Image (cartoon, helix red, strand yellow):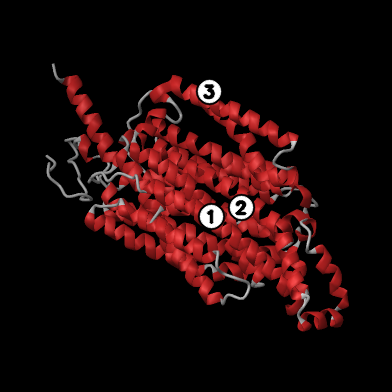
Amino acid sequence: MVQANRSPGERVSASATTPAPPAAEGDFTHRQIMTILAGLMMGMFLAALDQTIVATAIRTIADDLHGFSVQAWATTAFLITSTISTPLYGKLSDIYGRRRFFLAAIGIFVVGSALCGMAGDMYQLAAYRAVQGIGAGGLMSLALAIIGDIVPPRERAKYQGYFLAVFGSASVLGPVLGGLFAEADDVFGIAGWRYIFYINVPLGLLAMAVVARVLHLPHHRTDHRIDWPGALALIVGLVPLLTVAEQGRDWGWDSPRAILCYVVGVVGLVAFVLVERAYRDEALLPLRLFRNRTFGVGAASSFVVGMAMFGGLMMVPLYLQIVKGSSPMVAGLQMIPFVLGIMAGSILFGQIIFRTGRYRFIPIVGSALMLIALFLFSLITADTPLPATMAIMLLMGLGLGGNMQPIVTAVQNAVSPREIGTATSAVTFFRQMGGTLGTAVFLSVLFAAVPGRIRDAFTSAQSSPEFQQALRDHPDQAQALQAGQSTEGLNDTSFINTLTDVIAHPFKVGFSESMSLVFLLAAIIMIAGLIVVLFLPELPLQNRSAAAARAAEAAEARAAAETP
C-alpha cells in the first residue's frame, strides 16, 4: 500500500501488483521539476531571444533583401500569429494535454526559423515569420501552464523566477548576437544575418529532445466541443487591430485603411463575445472567468503592465544607441542591470511567497517600483551619466520581478485545475495585447515629438559660440541639420554618429526630451496598473499541484461512479 500521508514533493511509488492511488499522480520531486524546467526554459528562450535578436538586425536584413519599405511586415506577421495562437494553445492543451502541444509549438517554431533563414525577399520573410509566430504563441504560455501542473502554488513563484531570468537574459543576448551576426557579411558562404534564424534550429531540436524525454504529465481527457467559431471570430477581430497598431503610424491613424481595420476589428470582437457566451464553459475564453475577481484583476493588470513595460522599456535601448552612441551589441551589455534586477526581484519575492504563503502585497510593491523607475527614466537627459541610467534599470528589473510571476501564480491558484492552460494563456494574451498597444502609442508619441524638440534644441544651441564655431569648421554637416529636423530625415539615425559632438548634441537633446515624454506617459499608465492591482484579493495558496488536484478529482469521480 502507498502511504496516505506524505509531504509535498515527496515521491510516491506503487508496487508492481498494486496500482498507485490516483492522488499520487502529479507528485514531482524537486529533481524531477528541475529536469522538466530545463526543457521548458529552452523553449521559452527560443521565443524570447527571437524577438530581440531580430529587432536588432531587421534593418540589415531589409537592406540585403531590398525591402526596407516593407520591413515592418516581418514584425507584424509574427506578432499577429503569436498573439492569436496563444489562447488556442491554452484551451487545446487543457483538453488534450500539454506535452503534445508544447512539442508541436517548438517544432513549428523550428520549421519557421529554418524557412526564415532561406527567405529570398521581405514578403517571403514576413510569411515565414508568421509560421514562426504560430509556434511562439505556445512556447511562453504553455511553459507557465506546465509549471502550474507540476508545482503547488505556494512553491511556484520560486520556480517561475527561472523563467524571468530566461526572459531577461534573452533581452541582453538578443542585441549582442543580433549585432554580431548582422555585422558579419559572410559566414561559411552564407550571409551573417541568416544565422539569426538558423541558430534556432539546433536549439529547438535540443529543446524538443529534452522535453520529449522528461515531460510526462498525467492527463485525463475530458471531451469538449472545440470553439472553432470563437477562434475564427478572434482572428477577424485581432488581425486588423494588430495590423493597424503596427502600421497606423505609417498609414495615418485616420486613413481609410486604418478606419477599415477599426470597423472590421470591432465587428470581430463583438462576434467573439457573442460566440463565447453561446459556448459557455466550452468557449475558447469562458466569459465566466472574468467573474472571478483574481482572474479579472490579473488580466487587467497584465494588459496595463504590458503597455508600460514593453512600451517604456523599448525606449531604453533607443536611448543607449541614439543618445549615448552605443552599438546594438554594447547596448545589450549595458542592459545587464535590468536582467540582474529581474533575477534578484523574482528570487527575493519568490522566497517571500514560499515562506509566508502571502502574495497580494508583492505585485503592489512591484508596480510601485516600476512606477518610480519609469518616472526616474523621464528625468534623464542627454548628459545623464550612464551609471545613473543603469541604476534605474536595476530598479525597473526589481519591479518587474515582483509583478509578472506573482500575478500568474495568483490567477493559477484561483481557477479550476482543469483550466490552468486557459487562464495562463489568457494572462499572457492580455500582456501581449497591452505591449502591442503600448508600443504603437509610444512610438507615435516619440516620432511626433522628436522633430519639434530637435528644432528647439538647435534654436537654443545656435546662440552658443562653441556651436557656431563647430558649424564653421564643418560646413559639410549643415545639410544633416536640415534633414534631421524632419520625421522623414530621421528614418535613419546613423548619421548622428558622423557628426562632431558639439553639432550632434542638439539632436541627442531632442531625442532625450522626446523619450522623457514617452517615459512620463508610461509612468501615468503605470499609475492605473498600480490602482488595478490594489483590488487583487488574497486567497490561501494551495499546497498541491494542478496535476495532483486533477488526479484527485478523477479519483473522486471514479469512486462516486463505482458506489452503488
Relative to residue 507, is residue 56 depicted above or below?
above
N-terminal of the two: label 1 or label 3?
A: 3
| Element assignment for label 2 | helix
Numbered disc in front, either 2 or 3: 2
Residue 490 or residue 13, whichever sits in front:
490
Amino acid type for the residue under numbered disc 2: Phe
- Residue at (50, 54) in percent of width and height: 524
Task: Give x and y (percent) for residue 113.
Answer: 62, 48
- Residue 253 lies in quadrant: top right
Q: CA distance from mark 1 to mark 2?
A: 8 Å
- Between 409 and 469, the residue placed more toward the observer is 469
Give me the C-alpha separation between circle 1 and circle 3.
36 Å
Report whether residue 107 is seen: no
Residue at 19% across, 36% down = 21
The CA distance from mark 2 to mark 3 is 34 Å
Q: Quadrant of residue 195?
A: bottom right
Residue annotated with mark 3? 229
- Pointer 2 residue: 442
The answer to whether 10 appears left or right of 103 in the picture is left
Residue 510: x percent and y percent? 69, 66
Q: Is residue 425 visible?
A: yes
